[in-house]
Image (spheres, helix red, strand yellow):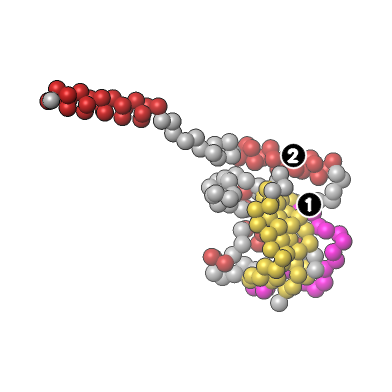
Amino acid sequence: MKKLNSILKLSAFILFVVLMASCKKDEDPYAGYTAEREAALIKEWVAAMKTEKLDFDSTTTGIYYIRDTTKIGTGLNVKTGDKLTVKYAGMFLNGVVFDSSLSFKYTHKDTNPYKRMIPGWEEGIEFLKKGESATFLIPSAQAYGVDGNKPIIPPYEPLLFIIEVVDIQ
């Protein structure tokens, strides 16, 4: 009986070791999301905009934007403290939408950091007036950075936002 218990314990231990050795650690689903991948995606997007002969501009922080010339705005550009109502769609460069709203209200550059938008949004929207719309390509350094906002936004992920300023108060 004692010998049987020893054999059972040894068998259980060997089974445990074999199972542990055969278990593979889950691979990081974001391993391919690198700064190099992001740079290539942005370069490809810029090339596509040039091919389409779309008129776009960029900022010193790497944000690209294309104004919607069919929507002429009025008044002053968005500034700190303005209470805004906007329509927007946020998407990846492959066109998959991750967020959108037809009537989003917020205070531009709110003093409460938990109510602020990503830096690229805050910077880009200041190019717009009431009634204007633009598409912004925001690099990860101006969005969710090297960590992303998992599980929705991977690390090093450039984002597209189509933003229309509906109202400024």
**What residue appears at the point 78 percent right and 52 percent down from the top-left corner?**
57
Q: Residue furthest bottom?
A: 169
Residue 109 among those drawn in magenta: no
> Where is 4 relative to 163, above or below?
above
Q: How crowded is mark 2: few (under 14 residues within 10 Å), some or many (20 or more)?
A: few
Q: Could you tell me which secondary element the residue under label 2 belongs to?
A: helix
Mark closer to the observer (1, 2)? 2
x, y percentage for residue 7?
20, 23
Q: Residue at x 76, y 70 (%)?
A: 166
Q: Give the range drawn in magenta.
A: 65-83
Tell whether label 2 touches label 1 (CB within 8 Å): no
Circle 1: is it few (<14), some (14-19), or many (20+) Cα within 10 Å? few
Note whether 85 is above or below 89 in the view shown: below
From the viewer's side, name the closer residue of 57 and 106. 106
Residue 131 - label: none
The residue shown at (12%, 25%) is 2
